[in-house]
Image: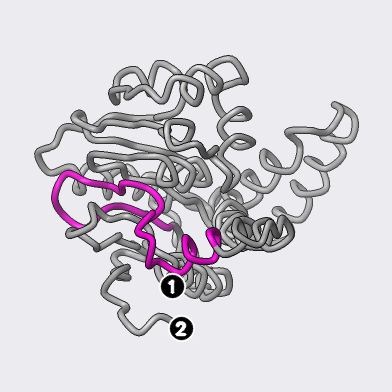
Amino acid sequence: MPGNKNILIYREQDRIAFIEINRPEKKNALSWDCWKLLDEYLEKLGTHQDIRALVITGHQGDVFSAGVDVTPTDKFITQMFHALEEKDQEKLVEGFAYIQNVLSKLAHLPVPTVAAINGLCYSGAVELAAACDIRVAQKNAVICLQESRLGLIPDLGGTVRLARLIGPGRSKDLIFTSRQISADEAKALGLINHIYPEDKFMQHVLEYVQQITANSPSAVSAVKQIINATATMDENAALKFEREKAAENVLTRQCIEGITAFLEKRKPDWKS
């Protein structure tokens, strides 16, 4: 695994996990080691029973991430150029597949995931954010998919997830033009869910995520699974999947605590 774990800072607060991208000298560009370390954290979070949500953000400052690190010495870029020289399409596909798989782990994590975009968010970082369930942004955030300007495409699942998130036409507009958009425009497009002021941004994020973690973990997880799985199903298949997951959720018995707490006018105490 990567030797420098400071490139992604992991911490926990109020049963919420935080992963902070910490490469200020590179505008938090995501190196190969970042992806490997993120993969490691996601593997652990997939079975971490005490964590109710995950927040990914940039560590301090006004930069979320400049995207994939395109420094020629970075392992991912080095491998890409070697494959290019050898005209090895399979090797290129393998490189893209690894990072796509990391982001798929993020997308399918059992707990809700939130990208807290605290400023500049470019290219691969937009794809990282798109793999999260929810995206919130600072008022001053700037979002841009600039891959086509570099002769590349959003190849980490971005073209697929973005189109499903905001629609094909809007996705093509952002990718074809490589134009920068503000947090306000991103919200109007449906890319951002909420915008918070720069002042005490992470406090606003924490308060928002606490609204999620106050609810039944099993119910929230079931809803995530249903919405993710049924997007491409026909209605009958989707409804069948929904009722099966609803039954599974009831069998967790968290509804007993939820209803009891409601009737007793107190906050529920979710044991798991």
Q: Is residue 106 visible in the rendered structure shown here?
A: yes
Mark 1 belongs to which amino acid?
Answer: Leu
Give the left or right position of residue 153, taking residue 126 as reference. Answer: right
Residue 226, compared with residue 197, is above or below; it is: below
Identify the residue under disc 1.
Answer: 37
Residue 239's disc number:
none
Q: Compare residues 84 and 211 and report the one nearer the observer.
A: 84
Residue 1's disc number:
2
At 46% from the left and 65% from the top, the residue drawn is: 35
Q: Compare residues 147 and 262 and report the one nearer the observer.
A: 147
Q: Which residues are magenta?
A: 54-81
User: Whole-percent x and y of residue 40?
Assistant: 50, 75
The answer to whether the residue labelled 2 contacts the one labelled 1, judged by CB atoms less than 8 Å apart, is: yes
User: Whole-percent x and y of residue 168?
Assistant: 62, 20
Label 1 sits on a secondary structure element that is helix
Name the residue furthest right: 236
User: Whole-percent x and y of residue 261?
Assistant: 47, 52
Give the Cα separation between the discs numbered 2 and 1: 7 Å
Give the left or right position of residue 163, taking residue 31 as reference. Answer: right
Is 202 colored magenta in this rendering?
no
Label 2 sits on a secondary structure element that is loop
Q: Quadrant of residue 145?
A: top left
Mark 2 belongs to which amino acid?
Answer: Met
